Amino acid sequence: MKHILVGVVCSLLFACLGIVDSYGQTVSAGEVDSTFKPSGTFWGQFFGDISVKVHADSLGQSNAANGRGNSEYSTYQKAFANEQIRRVYLGYTYNISKNFTTQWLAAYEEGTGVGGGNLTLDFGNERSFYMKLANIQWKNIFPNATLIFGAQATPAFVPSSETQWGYRSIEKTITDKYGIIKSADLGLGLSGSFDDAHNFGYDILYADGSGQKLETDRYKKVYADLWSYFMEKKIYVQLYGDINRVAGEVPSKDATILKLYVAYTTVPLTVGFEGFMYNTTNGIVDTVVATKTPETHDIKTIGLSFFATAQIIPNSLNAFARYDMFNPTGGLPFTGVIYANASTPLGFIGSGAALSTKENFFVVGLDYTPYKNVHIMPNVWYNSYSSQPVGNYSKLVGSTALNSDFELVPRLTVFYKF
């Protein structure tokens, strides 16, 4: 898979760079198109909540560091009331010419810093901005294609499930929520459609794989997808995959993702499904000292997400609901336990090596729009946990699942954009 993706990316990008004035170039180099006037637009968005955590996971109640959650509420104790700004965006898009556009975005995104949560605070624990997007786009480099260089949105969910779900202000899509795929990365991307009606298209991105952070290794990540519309654009289908070497050579760790997204959109109802499998080869080492040589095991992570949005009163009141299922090990046992002998553990290696915690997430709410682009959304956020010891660890503590528990957070979310 890796060689196929890399080969496709290199072939397409070199083909693009080899095209010189073959399409859409009506003005010679150095000349100015008098019919075009450069222009720019500021844009932005804001969302935040008033919330209270009415129930907390028992494993994290006495010590938040032991909690099983992966969300912005994981470290909050029961009865914690909070006024929170979860996102502030300030962006600028400047059209240099008919075929060249640049995009900038400064972002503040609040979270716990745990798992998929962002933490954009400075050393004084004050809110701060970071650079999320900064790129230049060459439109129509060949028919219906745009070449993008710089920090840009990845093709995983931003142009597909996040847009059609439509409620990023309520919760991230499932791969974003659990930190499986980044929303933006730095690299060279190609996006386009195979037809003039834009019913069938593709995205390819060759990037650092480090998201908004500085690159710290020599490995790259390849993102690719194919998408299509059917039934007069009522049905949208996306098949997505990426591959990235995340660590070492012996044994190497290659992370691959396959994702299917399908949505049906009409007025007044939209329903969607998103499912992914995330595989890390040699993801964890099983070392049993004095009994056998180290072994490596692949980690398979599986997630499913279903959502529905409905218009109740046009331009005034909508309803939304979503359910996610997340299984970090796909039901496959692994150990991750270091033994002094056959029965005495010394400790663990790898994150979550001894426990497999399945999560079920549910959110439901209303979206009241008193004025265009201003949304007031009462909603209820729920996340449950069910942990099971795995591998040799289960032989020590028994195979009985640990207590299941949940987090429950009623919220009033406010969102606006301009």
Image: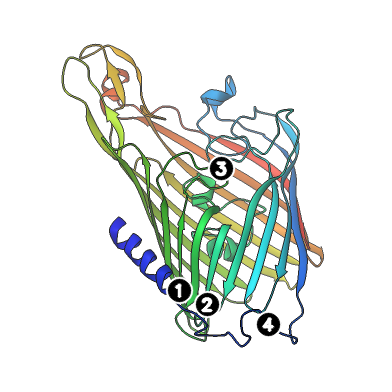
Pick out the residue farthest to the right: 371
Secondary structure found at label 3: loop
Q: Position of residue 376 (x, y in %)?
A: 77, 56
Q: Foreground residue, 325 or 283? A: 283
Q: First in sequence, mark 2 or 1: give its number.
A: 1
Q: First in sequence, mark 2 or 3: give its number.
A: 2
Residue that numbered label 2 is attached to: 141
Q: First in sequence, mark 4 or 3: give its number.
A: 4
- In the image, taking residue 194 as reference, residue 370 lies left or right, namely right
Quadrant including the C terminus: bottom right
Q: Using the numbered discs, state the Cα–Cα distance from disc 4 to disc 3 in whole angstroms.
A: 39 Å
Residue that numbered label 4 is attached to: 31
Q: Using the numbered discs, state the Cα–Cα distance from disc 2 to disc 1 in whole angstroms.
A: 7 Å
**Measuring 65% from the left and 28% from the top, which residue is drawn there?**
78
Pointers 4 and 2 in contact (CB under 8 A)? no
Amino acid found under the numbered disc labelled 4: Glu
Characterize the local packing of mark 4: few (<14), some (14-19) or many (20 or more) Cα atoms within 10 angstroms: few
Residue that numbered label 3 is attached to: 213
Question: Viewer-nearest of labels 1 and 4?
Answer: 4
Q: Position of residue 110 (x, y in %)?
A: 68, 41
Q: Using the numbered discs, state the Cα–Cα distance from disc 2 to disc 3 in whole angstroms.
A: 29 Å
Question: Viewer-nearest of labels 4 and 2?
Answer: 4
Q: Foreground residue, 5 or 116? A: 5
Amino acid found under the numbered disc labelled 3: Lys
Characterize the local packing of mark 1: few (<14), some (14-19) or many (20 or more) Cα atoms within 10 angstroms: some
Q: First in sequence, mark 1 or 4: give its number.
A: 1
263 versus 22 height, above or below: above
- In the image, taking residue 248 as reference, residue 130 lies left or right, namely right
